[in-house]
Amino acid sequence: MNVLVVDDSSAMRKIIISALNKTELRGSRTIEAATGKEGLDKFLDGNFAFILSDWNMPEMDGLEFVTRVRNLDRRVKIIMITTEGTMGKLENALDQGVDEYVVKPFTPETLDRKIKKLLGVKPQ
Amino acid sequence: MNVDVSSAKLNEIAEKVWSMVLGLPLTPSKCDPARAEASAFVLGRVTISGTWQGSVTLGCSQALARRAAAAMFGKPPAEADSSDIRDALGELTNMVGGNFKTLLKGDCRLSVPNVVDVVPYAEVDPAPVEHQWFECEGGVVILNVLAASTGRSRTT
């Protein structure tokens, strides 16, 4: 399974990938992108089952990135990883095509719970 | 424009970020400028623009910043280089600033973090009246929220 991790912070990409290795997606092939535009280019080149994207990025923010991905693909599962905890904004993100969100800081257990929910795996 | 966010809430944000991301305890402590003046700091800053304008800074004594980077990237402190330290403090500042932003009324945007490697204490804590000091493994962390309109620290 291919997973695309989109975040302008290299530190956050490392944190996300480290957390992914403790979730249901462990062993997946992870591809990194540092901007929404780079994420879109890599998405077009690959066959991704999951995208984990930051919200607050320069040039193309996470919402615009998600909107563009959704215009191309309705099936890929998208998790927004953000410090944005305002319910109105999070609901807007869900309306734009985000499947789940994780508020930073987060634990691998929280991320795993969201991933299992999207995969339809019952929590143990 | 001032912002009504309590010191307790700021402490809670910083402690949560530090413990969840690094697995290190952050303990609120009393301001000790004499001790801090003997240290060099790594300083992270994010600016907030919109209905509230200002910045959130996170100053971390150098040795602690190295340990934080090591904890974040799962490597021994001796192997954490300056790039790791900048990345780590930038992300910690981004998370603290982002969580602070969610407490603000109205629409605000957070900048990408900026990190400066070696700064003296005076630049970390420019208005030493309103700030949060923390201890972690023998090092100091100073959180400051500065309103742009006055150049002064947050009032609670």
Image (cartoon, rainbow, N blue to C red):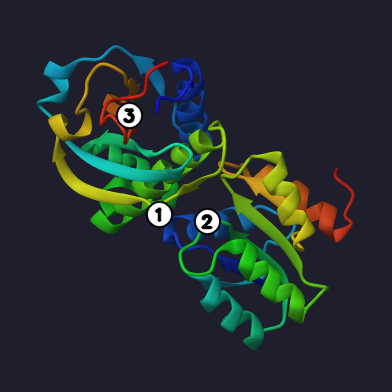
Q: Residue at x 56, y 36 (%)?
A: B102
Identify the residue shown where x is 19% and y is 28%.
Answer: B126
Label 3: how many Cα within 10 Å (few below 14, some 14–19, many 20+): many
Query: Are tags 3 and 2 found on a single chain?
Result: no
Q: Secondary structure at mark 2?
A: loop
Chain of the residue where label 2 is placed in the rendered structure: A
Dot 3 falls on a residue whose secondary structure is strand
Pointer 1 and pointer 2 on the same chain? no
Circles 1 and 3: CB distance less than 8 Å?
Answer: no
Q: Amino acid at mark 2?
A: Asn
Q: Amino acid at mark 3?
A: Asn
| Amino acid type assigned to the residue bearing label 1 in the image | Val
Q: Residues within 10 Å of mark 2 (few under 14, many from 20)?
A: many
* Label drawn at residue B144: 3
- Residue that numbered label 2 is attached to: A56
Chain that bears disc 1: B
Which of the two discs, 1 and 3, labels the residue nearer the N terminus? 1
Residue B150 found in image quarter: top left
CB of mark 1 within 8 Å of CB of mark 2?
A: yes
Q: Cα distance, mark 1 to mark 3?
A: 17 Å
Q: Residue furthest top?
A: B30
**Quarter of the image that includes the C terminus of chain A:** top right
Is A60 positioned to the left or the right of B42 in the image?
right
How much space separates mark 3 and mark 2, taking CA atoms?
A: 22 Å
Residue name at image x 48 percent, y 16 percent: B8
Q: Position of residue A103 (x, y in %)?
A: 63, 44
The residue nearer to you, when weighing B121 against B53, is: B53
Chain containing mark 3: B
Q: Position of residue B131 (x, y in %)?
A: 32, 21
Please provide percent x and percent y for residue A113.
77, 47
